[in-house]
Image (cartoon, rainbow, N blue to C red):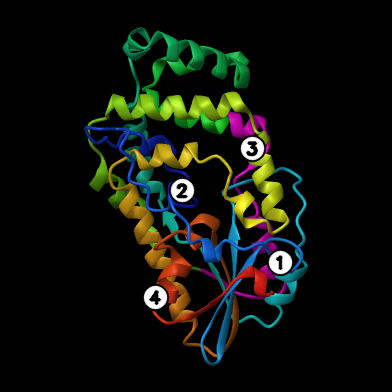
Amino acid sequence: MRAVLTGLALSAAVMGSSANAQAIDDPQANVVEALVVSAKLPGPAWWRVSDGDTTIYVLGVPSALPKGQPWDRTVLERRLDGAFALLTPPVWQAGLTDIPAMLRLRNSLKDDGDWAARSPALAARTQRAWTAVDPKNADGWRRWKPLLVALQLNGKANAQAKLQTSQPDKDIAELARKKRVKARPAATHKAMPMLKSVVREHGEAAGLVCLSETLDATEVGAAPIRAAAQAWSQGRVKDALAGPRSAERCELLLPGVADLKRQLVDDEVEGLTNLLKTPGHAVAYFPLRALVAENGVLDKLRSRGITVRTPGEG
């Protein structure tokens, strides 16, 4: 989940699971096919949201890009010229005073390793995958519960593949500063109240499912992620959406995360609706799948009677 659990992965794993860990509530499983249109202009795909006197150019972005991934910024630069705002995804804030609580949550994820004895085949796969991404600490996974092992393994594999979760956000922010366009998030939330409200006794079943899916993605390697990133850079929306979602599915095993994703979509819808009150034009960027999903950002805007144009319309 982009920008939702950023900085919270170590603590989020303490959340519990439902009785049936595999019954994942995925609000963005399905997309609106009419919105999944390849870009007519060079570079990534843009959608346009408009009313009588305001146009908002909305860019869909991936959760990460391979280091050095080229993408055409021409359209972005042009649309930032004269824009009255840059609307970004919602942000989660945690302060220095939250650090002790975060550390306590992390420490609660330590494990005696019994799960590995009960699941020897999964443990063997974990050992191979962990050794491949962290050979100097090959047994480092053994002291953690499965869900945290999965989160850490995903992070280590991404680092080894040189995937940058700060991109393309960082490039967009730099161009906005260059153009003197003020950026503001669609919403701001405090992180710790959310975490404290959903923390439950850790469910091992959810952790094992998450770890299994993470291993599936890790064993395949970074090629599918790189292919999706390349497709994104060329405005091929359908292919960009075909990238792996194992990390997101892990998050969705945690109680409250599906509803949280729905809340983030509502935040983005309200942020765009509020921008439409100001004449002129603005720029926004949000996670690609959240934009085009059923009951996603653009689908909800259309249901309000707001005009939405696809990337195929230029």
Could you tell me which residue is drawn at 52 percent across and 61 percent down? Answer: 33
Judge from the rendering whether residue 36 lies leftward or rightward of residue 209; answer left or right: right
Q: Mark 4 points at which residue?
A: 303
Q: Mark 1 points at which residue?
A: 175
Where's residue 21, x and y in %? 29, 32
Q: Name the residue under label 3.
A: 224
Q: Give the range drawn in magenta.
A: 157-184
Q: Compare marks 4 and 1 and give the one earlier in the sequence.
A: 1
Where's residue 103, x and y in %? 37, 34
Q: Compare marks 3 and 2 and give the one earlier in the sequence.
A: 2
Helix, strand or loop at mark 1: helix
Where's residue 217, x and y in %? 55, 30
Q: Do labels 3 and 2 touch, CB within 8 Å?
A: no
Helix, strand or loop at mark 2: loop
Q: Is residue 74 above or below residue 140?
A: below
Quadrant (top left/top right/bottom left/bottom right) for the C terminus: bottom right
Q: Which amino acid does label 4 sit on?
A: Ser
Q: State the separation of the CA atoms marked 2 and 1.
A: 24 Å
